[in-house]
Image (cartoon, rainbow, N blue to C red):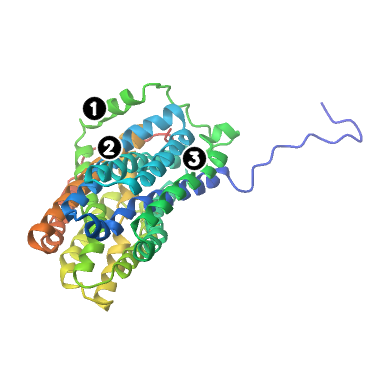
Amino acid sequence: MSATPGSAAPASPRAPRVHYAWVVAAVALLVLLGSAGFRSTPSLMMDALHNEFGWSMATISSATSVNLTLYGLTAPFAAALMDRFGVRLVVVCALLTISVGAGLTMLMREPWQLVLCWGVLVGLGSGSMAGAFATTITGRWFTARQGLVTGVLTAAGAAGNLVFLPLGAWLVEAHGWRSAVVVVSLAASAVAVPVLLLMRERPADLGLLPYGATEEPPAPAADRRALARSLRVLRDAARSRAFWLLAGSFAICGATTAGLVGTHFIPAAHDHGLPVTTAASLLALIGVFDVVGTIASGWFTDRVDSRLLLVVYYALRGLSLVLLPQLFAGSLEPPILAFVIFYGLDWVATVPPTVALCRRHFGEDAPIVFGWVLACHQIGAAVVAGLAGLARDALGTYDLAWYAAGGLCAVAVVLCLALRGTGAPRVVPALS
């Protein structure tokens, strides 16, 4: 039917200038920025808690170990819960759990209370926003630029440290450790607001295709049993050699980053006479270079064999950790700054290629599989966080921990090389 004279022709729908996927990615970036900053706070408080309560480094590290373990074990179930109840509800509940856990820390008098508040509550909350969250967002909202967006979201962890570590160190030094946990508690509540207002579940909710898609992805399979699905995916993935190689190498990644450097770098530097605020600033500076390295890693992941990227990353990390004990000094010197730059570029550059390999081998189950791989990452981190504290109490130095971490990186190189021949890539639609 043609339009009558003088009547306006119906307007054709126009695509938005900015795809809403970028809005969702920006909200996810804010969430991950905050989550990383919240998790970094215990390393700032170790000396303060030791001085006030007389607790050993091993005792304080045990809370961090519980935090790291639950952070990892929560991730695969959080991915399934996001499918079942929605990303927005799960993330808001996680942020409020962190807020409550951090706030209650102010009232603690015994070590078990530190384990309960910072280990259990903050661990569960931050674990619900772990790597599976970023994988879910990129899988649902992006067909193009998945590797790059994964890299950017992963780099948010480093950027969160950049914001929180110097601020937290200053608060601990100037006003005591309780002021730092108050800031964490309030910030976690504040971050929940944009999640409530702006987060959407899927492009189809807004009548959109995923960014870069040319056709509607298949509807996700309805599975109302989040726990059962997480365990089923683990059972199926565990039959694959690729899963165990990825899980083993990523456990070493956690051991040599969050478990050792993330937890013990500040007290180790302080052992050599470096002020806590300066050590915290160095750890934050690692985060600056990690942002660059992780985004670059996402770019490389779209273009280079992910397995080879992991081999290079673990080899370089191991070299830097073996050299670290000789680089510490009582003041800022060029060698320790060189370590910060070199190690920072590698900090979590392993995440984009590991996510890509999960997608390659496990298709639409990749977010949950990566959640389980991340659980192994955090278990590795938890074990080393505790062992390094014990080593420091027994030997009076962290040197053995740094050398052992370098050896573990060599093992990770071997595991990544063994990924050759673990199966052909699956051709799959965008992740649910």
| Residues marked 2 and 3 touching at CB (< 8 Å) | no
- Quadrant location, the C terminus: top left
Element on which disc 2 rests: helix
Q: Please give the residue where the numbered disc 2 appears in the rendered image.
A: 73
Give percent across and percent down for residue 422: 21, 39
Q: Residue at x 57, y 43 (%)?
A: 20
- Quadrant location, the N terminus: top right
Going by the numbered disc 1, the residue's amino acid type is: Arg
Taking the image as shown, residue 154 lies to the left or right of residue 233, namely right
Mark 1 to mark 3: distance in Å? 27 Å
Mark 2 to mark 3: distance in Å? 25 Å
Q: Residue at x 12, y 64 (%)?
A: 397
Return the residue nearer the eye: 351 or 328.
Answer: 328
Give percent across and percent down for residue 295: 40, 57
Element on which disc 1 rests: helix
Return the residue nearer the eye: 281 or 73.
Answer: 281
- Name which quarter of the figure residue 226 lies in: top left
- Name which quarter of the figure residue 396 lies in: bottom left
Mark 2 to mark 1: distance in Å? 15 Å
| Residues marked 1 and 3 touching at CB (< 8 Å) | no
Q: Earlier in the sequence, mark 2 or mark 3?
A: 2
Return the residue nearer the eye: 136 or 262.
Answer: 262
Q: Earlier in the sequence, mark 2 or mark 1?
A: 2
Labelled disc at residue 235: 1
Going by the numbered disc 3, the residue's amino acid type is: Trp
Q: Residue at x 39, y 46 (%)?
A: 103
Return the residue nearer the eye: 243 or 156.
Answer: 156
Q: Earlier in the sequence, mark 1 or mark 3?
A: 3
Give percent across and percent down for residue 84: 42, 26
Going by the numbered disc 2, the residue's amino acid type is: Leu
Q: Please give the residue where the numbered disc 3 appears in the rendered image.
A: 141
